[in-house]
Image (cartoon, rainbow, N blue to C red):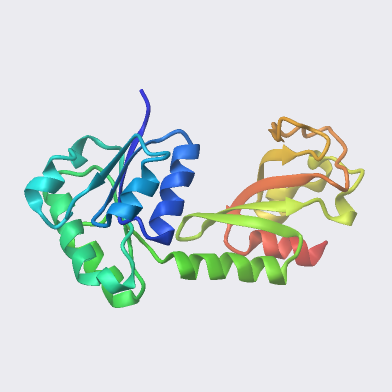
Amino acid sequence: MQRQALIIGLGRFGMALARSLHAEGYAIIAVDRDEERVQAASEFADRAVRLDATDEQALASLSPESRELTVCAMGEDSRETAILVTTLLRQLGAKRIVARANNTLVARILRLVGAHEVFDPEVEFAERFARRLTYQGISDEIRLGPNLVISELKVRPAMVGRTLSELELPEQFGLTVLAIRKSDDATGLSAPDPRAELREAWGLLVVGEEGAAAALHEAW
């Protein structure tokens, strides 16, 4: 059965998130009070609805309790509305509420009223981009928890011609290789072969504690 995501707030971030989740296979229910935004979302969303999400009955009509994911994506100018909508979503039984916050106080309040996860997209992007600028061999990072990160690394010169077994990344850096991205492989990521010699143009998708990928980059 197709996963369903309810996205409330179709500003620049909310719209981009809705498109991205749609590309990942989610059935999207997109919600905003602005008719133009709703019309734009209707081009890709399974359902685009114009309503006031602070209206409890209107929000209940979207059946948030039956969606795998609900995102309150409202921006800085809608802090009070975001808090109220998050409260209503929790009362209506939404399974997983992810809320956007632009400062620490709002984030704390959103957690108190029922958000399961709170994020600040600008801060998260800035942190990831700073790592890319500092460690040019780290092309991307995704945080899985307070201290666990998935990173994509370019194969370092010292790794070329060596195998994963020889490198002993788990023992030396606490990194586990999840997949290999080969430049000559049109299918994208492939399962790691511990006996295959690494090539310069390849990338490694690894998981480990925060800072482990940077430590590898600096060591090699």
Image: 200 above or below 137: above
Q: In which quarter of the image is residue 22?
A: top left
Q: Residue at x 60, y 56 (%)?
A: 141
Q: In which quarter of the image is the N terminus?
A: top left
Residue 33 x %, y %: 23, 56
Farthest right residue in view:
161
Q: In which quarter of the image is the C terminus?
A: bottom right
Q: Which of 148 and 47 is in front in this view?
A: 47
How many numbered marks have been drawn onto this rendered protein structure?
0
Report the side of 48 relative to 164 (left or right).
left
* Looking at the image, residue 32 lies above or below residue 184: below
Residue farthest left in this picture:
57
Residue at position x 73%, y 39% from top?
Answer: 180
Q: Is residue 129 or residue 14 the one in the foreground? A: 14
Position of residue 79 relative to residue 187, above or below, is: below
Give the x, y percent position of residue 75: 33, 67
Where is residue 214 drawn, in percent x and y?
69, 64
Out of 182 and 81, give the one closest to the viewer. 81
Residue for point 18% across, 40% down: 62
Q: Position of residue 3 (x, y in %)?
A: 36, 32
Would you identify the image quadrant in which residue 77 lies? bottom left
